[in-house]
Amino acid sequence: MRSFYTASPTCTVSRACLLTGRIPQRHGLTEQLGGVEGNYGVGLDQNEVLIPQVLKQAPTPYATGCFGKWNIGFAEGSRPTERGFDEFIGNASGNIDYYRHNYREKHDLYRGTEELHREGEYSTDLFADAAIAFIRRKAETEKPWFCYLPFNASHFPSPGNRIEGEPNVWQAPDWALEAAGVAKNTFVFFMSDNGAFRLGCDGLDVGSNEPLRNGGVTCWEGGLRVPAMARCPGKIAPGTIIDAPLWSPDLLIACAELSGAPRPDVILDGKKRCRC
């Protein structure tokens, strides 16, 4: 997809738009959640309907799992397993230390609503493995499932998550993860929630949005126009290039159409774009 847009150039708001199918001015979460207090507050209005809740209303209800970065509120009633997800392993905040899983002074890794301690494990691997295990278990039941996998990667390192005296450098193992294949009747969608940051930070601004202008946290093309890929065997031919503008609120519509679930009775900002 050459012209796919996220509905916001900042993580919190982008995720809220994706999960609700609505622009910020409708769902009300218009600013990035900041600090421990912000990330552990209510965040997104608890009356908003999310994709997993839509899929629970399908003729055959979907099993739902979320593995990775949440970042839209973690107060009671706002957590993934309270908003339509059957399973959750991930971090409440915007970003964490990749190995210690802390956000500022707080341990920030959870299974459901309980703290999970897996110190020393690389968070990207931890989330990928949890998602793969979920998919394998659900595939055995032959019932439909939905897996939301918002990686903490590729966040640049945050000085606030470092131990005093530790260098603020990129964190990654020295080997690559090879993804397993998915079933032929599975729709897979990959996107970035915003463009690469161009913050003038020496050594950290390694991403590039060229030839687009600027990057994440701005509303220039470099902040909103993002990489996106879809896989739907038998419906999307391999190598298909789509130039038509698409954006993240379309995903809730797609999920409802594919599952046969009714759409939420609210104004949605996505559209049915294809026959996948």
Image: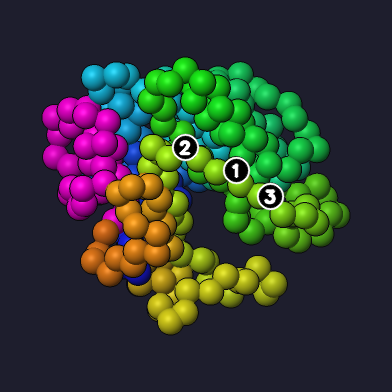
At mark 3, the secondary structure is loop
- Residue 229 on image: x %, y %: 41, 57
Q: Is residue 69 above or below residue 14?
A: above
State the extent of the magenta-drawn residues as a range.
247-276
Residue under label 1: 180
Between label 3 and label 1, give the one nearer the viewer.
Answer: 1
Q: In screen coordinates, is 212 left or right of 197?
A: left
> Label 2: which residue?
183
- Left or right of 239, for residue 3: left
Question: What kind of secondary structure does the magenta stretch mostly adopt?
Answer: loop
Q: Residue at x 49, y 25 (%)?
A: 139
Q: Residue at the spot x=38%, y=37% of the render?
A: 185
Residue 177 numbered tag = 3
Q: Write down the quadrant of residue 36 in the picture.
A: top right
Q: Is residue 92 visible?
A: no
In three-dimensional space, the C-alpha distance between marks 2 and 3, rounded to whole angstroms, equals: 19 Å
Q: In this orientation, which residue lies closer to the viewer: 140 or 225? A: 140
Helix, strand or loop at mark 1: loop
Quarter of the figure that contains the N terminus: bottom left
Location of residue 225 (image quadrant): bottom left
Q: Residue at x 64, y 59 (%)?
A: 156
Residue 143, percent across and down?
40, 21
Q: How is the image coloured?
A: rainbow
Residue 246 on image: x %, y %:
26, 59
- Within-10-Å neighbours for mark 3: few <14, some 14–19, many 20+: few
46 sits left or right of 160 in the view: left
